[in-house]
Image: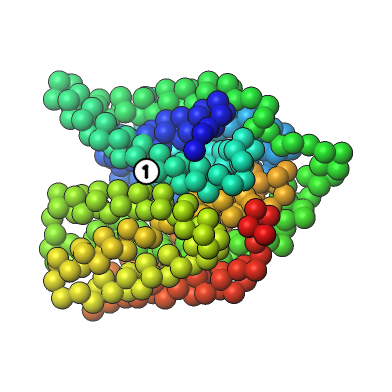
Amino acid sequence: MTLTRDGRLLFLTRFVRLFSYGMLAVVLVFYLTGLGLSESQTGLLLTLTLVGDTAISLLLTTQADRIGRRKMLIAGSVLMSAAGLAFAFTNNFMLLVVAGTIGVISPSGNEVGPFLPIEQAALSEVIPSRTRTSAFAWYSLTGSMATAAGSLFAGVLTDSLTKSAATPISGERTVVLVYAAMGAVLGVIFGMLSPGTEVHRTSDTPSKMKNLLGIGASRGVVLRLCGLFALDAFGGGFVVQSFAAYWFYLRFGVNPATLGGIFFGANVLAGISSLLATRLASRIGLVRTMVFTHLPSNVLLILVPLMPNLRLAILVLLLRFSISQMDVPTRQSYTMAVVAPEERSAAAGITGVARTTGAAIAPLFVGLLFSKPNLINLPFFIAGTLKIAYDLLLYRGFVDHQPAEEK
């Protein structure tokens, strides 16, 4: 796969951003409680931060194809840097709420804000359609490795600074300041993108782009995909990594150090598996790749709590992760392929918000289930069942809706 200058810049921004998110996620809760916030205040702040990130993402991504992708990406970078500076220099709860809601802060290490949808749309402009899935696979792997590197960097930096600092929070504040600086770096790199990353306008493009939320001709497809992606994310929300790790602790008494090793290996396998999706998609198509790899991974998910001992449970979990992410680059590529080019940023943003919303609802139920010792296995069964339903509905609704390059 050969990338243009713009393609290389977009891969670089992906690495810088996910490195920053992974770095911040390690220290954020420790930093906020060190500022004097209570656990309940911290939880409320992080919830409002995610709500704000979702709203900002929807606002910027739905206008990016009309106003300009580079402008919206730079705006997101400014919000990221401003939020980092605010978090570094105030301990006032209300100011932190305002900064977290309006700015871009990732409490989980995952993508937030407007960047991912707009970058996907921009990347689709500067690569041939036949290599789009491959590019998205490497793009996904780049993010996974960057998150891991950022997490490691934050741990090493805070450990070394805390030993020499007068207060333990000094090391964590340094990480927050580095996060703010990374936002500024992102803005500079986004400013270096060429006009080739923007919408290729035709005479009727402006009229198309006046439709609700930036989507017109693609509205039906996007709304159907939103419903399906929200269902998939809702199911996945029952077994997010923090809950899965807690299940291993409750079921087998696994200590945090061991859990870290288990999920590091699982995430590495997941990142590598995304690369395998490219060759498979070229043979059987994007939708079939999404379904035929995702479906068995969800069967394995249901089998995890049925394993009689820790080794078998870990084995099944690792097998599941080895194929579970093959649908990510194919899903992203398919979304870009079946919508009009001038609606790609909006489509990616809207479907991304649908996934975020679906995933945000599930934890409310998981906490209740984990409070009942006889129900701790139920989240795996619910997640697997919902995600299998998603696979079947996706296949039924879209297997005949092929991108142009597959026809």
Label 1 element class? helix
Q: Which residue is mark 1?
A: 144
Nearer to the camera, 281 or 260: 281
Q: Position of residue 162 (x, y in %)?
A: 18, 27
Left or right: 39, with 111 as reference point? left
The residue carrying pointer 1 sits among few (fewer than 14), some (14 to 19) or many (20 or more) residues within 10 Å by Cα, namely many
Q: Position of residue 238 (x, y in %)?
A: 37, 65
Residue name at image x 56 percent, y 45 percent: 132
Most distant residue in the bottom direction: 374
Q: Position of residue 198 (x, y in %)?
A: 68, 33
Q: Quadrant of residue 402?
A: bottom right
Nearer to the camera, 322 or 246: 322
Nearer to the camera, 127 or 24: 127
Q: Position of residue 311 (x, y in %)?
A: 14, 65
Residue name at image x 53 percent, y 20 percent: 188
Q: Quadrant of residue 209?
A: top right
Eyeballing the image, is 131 above or below 242? above
Is residue 35 visible to the viewer in this orientation of the structure? Answer: yes
Eyeballing the image, is 165 above or below 150? above
Left or right: 130, with 199 as reference point? left
Eyeballing the image, is 170 above or below 112? above
Residue name at image x 34 percent, y 39 percent: 145
Left or right: 41, with 126 as reference point? left
Nearer to the camera, 407 or 355: 407
